[in-house]
Image (cartoon, rainbow, N blue to C red):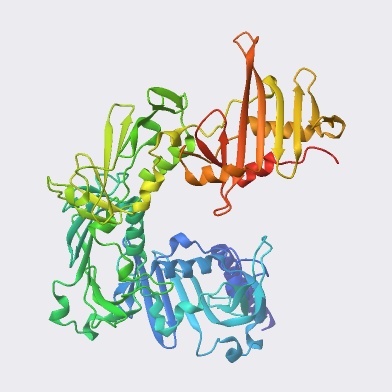
Amino acid sequence: MRSILLTLTVAISALALGAVALWQHRDGNLHRILGQPPTAIGNKIFPDFDPNEAVLISLVSGGVEADFIKTLDGWKSTKPWDDRMDMRAAMAIIGFTSSTTAVDLVERDKLDPDLSGMGSTSHNVRIKNAKGNTIAYYRLGRKTPWEFLSQAEGAKPAPTIYLLPLERGRKSHVYAATGDILPLFKDNFKYLRDHRPLYFNPLNLQKIYIKTSEGELTLGREKLNSPWRIIKPLDLATDPSTMKNLLEKLFEIQAIKLSDRSEVTISKERTSSNKIEISIVNYGSDQQTKLEIFPAESAFARTSLAIVSDRPDTVFDLPLKSEPDLISISDLPLTVNELREATLTNLNIASIRGIAIESVASPTILVSRDPPAPWIVTVSNRELEANEQRLFELLKAVTETRALAFVTDSAPEDLSPWGLDRPILKLIFLAENHQSLTLLFGLDTSGNLYAMRKGSTSIMSLDVEFLEKIAVRQHEWRHARLGSFNRVDLMSLKRQDIQAESLELSYDFIGDTWKAKRGEKDVSANLDPLKANFLMGVIESLEVKEWLSEDDEEAIKTLENSFLKFEIQQRLVDEFGDKTGEVTEVISIGVSKTSGKIFGKKSSENLYFSLSEETVLKLSIPLLDE
């Protein structure tokens, strides 16, 4: 009897050990028998989860079940509605599962379910792969009292939530898990339903059809990298920033509320011609996705109802007017004049070789260049280096100024109503390939400014301030450099201001030394040579703020009582450096008592100029240590 009992005991033990060996061989461990060890603090709770394998998400919360499946067109819900899932929500759930880590843990039977939210208010999440195998299964409770602070620089405390793995062998511990996706499960999962009516890849769009009460238009592009154009009703270039704005807002606009089509009645009056229709077509497809936005119930309505062709069972309540943090229907640029290129030109500045400025106020000014040489201005058959600031202002104005409105796209032969029959300004641009562009500007009898391109039938209205940005007088195009001064040829520099006796400086270039006299007194010992060098450097590089005409009344009156004067005596030399004579230039500077502007004038010219306050401060630097 004892031997039989012993034999049975040995056999059972062997069978048990064999089963253990089989389980270990199949699973690689004994977790099914002994349970999986809890995740160590700081480690991922689902380390083997592969986000790329997720194709099915099943959720249960408060007795409501929801299933979402990944398709070629994105994530879709099959329960409790047949509709598109918000891709951002799917990515949030999958991203949370993949990245959440254990901040703390507690044995499950030692945690109050009501305190942790693991009771009736919990949320179950199950994620499966294409084979139908569960790759993550867990329950979420409330937020924990603890926050997680990453070691990354500048990181802020992040919330943690109670998480209980529901996979076999892992139900023994509840974790304080990093991340918070609890808002996604509010109100029976309604936030998981995509509130955006249109879902598309902006890079793959080929055409957009728009119909409003103002008419119909078609936007299109030939290739993926081609710019968008208005194809109908006119062939026009689009404004790149406005087109980008349209695509972004079409993608981002979302409903305040979603309803099932069976729950909403849309009257025939609201499906009239007053509705807005927006249809999109992808490359390689003839199928349109059409969004129809119906007229609001009243002028005071907050939303308008809308439907979209690829989600026929869903009705969208879209924001009608601008609200904080919401894209509204009124934010969508949907008309030709909003979408068309509204700038005067799209000039390629690098290709410009010449600009002719014809004005009723002054003879023609020609600005030209032959790269890499600088810009040259030709006035009265005389060539001078052009004023770069005036050139910059002109090019900036014609490439950035936008139309206030487009008056007409079919201008008649008679252009007199807009003053374009006798333009007050004409700008002609010549490119290196000998192509030219001519812009005409006119004023109507009310002083409104209009512009059109020669050869075009479109007339646009502009802000009249545009004219102030275009220098049309010859003297305005002079280079900003005041004169040709240099210390090599300097004989003497006398500075006189109203607060002190004049100070005369002389410079020895070979010895690099300065001497100074105040009146008849030698004050060289008190002269700071560094400050003298600084002053001479300012004079050598002196540039005016603006050249003014010889009859500028304010400048004339101001300089009747100048407060600062420089007398600069230089030797004249020939090409071999031999002295051929002397020249003296007097620069007078004054400040207007009415406007505070600073004016100046050279004795050798009749033109006046203005200076900046910074320049005058440099010219007034104290030179003597007294």
- The quadrant holding residue 40 is bottom right
In this view, the residue in front, 609 or 306, is 609
Quadrant (top left/top right/bottom left/bottom right) for the N terminus: bottom right
In this view, the residue in front, 191 or 622, is 622
- The quadrant holding residue 323 is bottom left
- Marks counted in the figure total 0
For residue 566, above or below residue 329: above
* Residue 392 location (% of width, % of height): 45, 39
Determine the residue positioned at 43% across, 82% down.
Answer: 60
For residue 257, above or below residue 120: above
Determine the residue positioned at 72% across, 25% down.
Answer: 492
* Side of 292 where 150 appears, left or right: right
Determine the residue positioned at 20% across, 48% down.
Answer: 458
- The quadrant holding residue 275 is bottom left
* Side of 249 where 560 appears, left or right: right
Q: Is residue 624 visible?
A: yes
* Side of 399 where 504 appears, left or right: right
* Residue 198 location (% of width, % of height): 30, 66
Q: Is residue 37 visible?
A: no
In this view, the residue in front, 579 or 154, is 579
For residue 180, above or below residue 499: below
* Residue 514 location (% of width, % of height): 79, 26
Quadrant (top left/top right/bottom left/bottom right) for the C terminus: top right
* Side of 440 where 21 appears, left or right: right
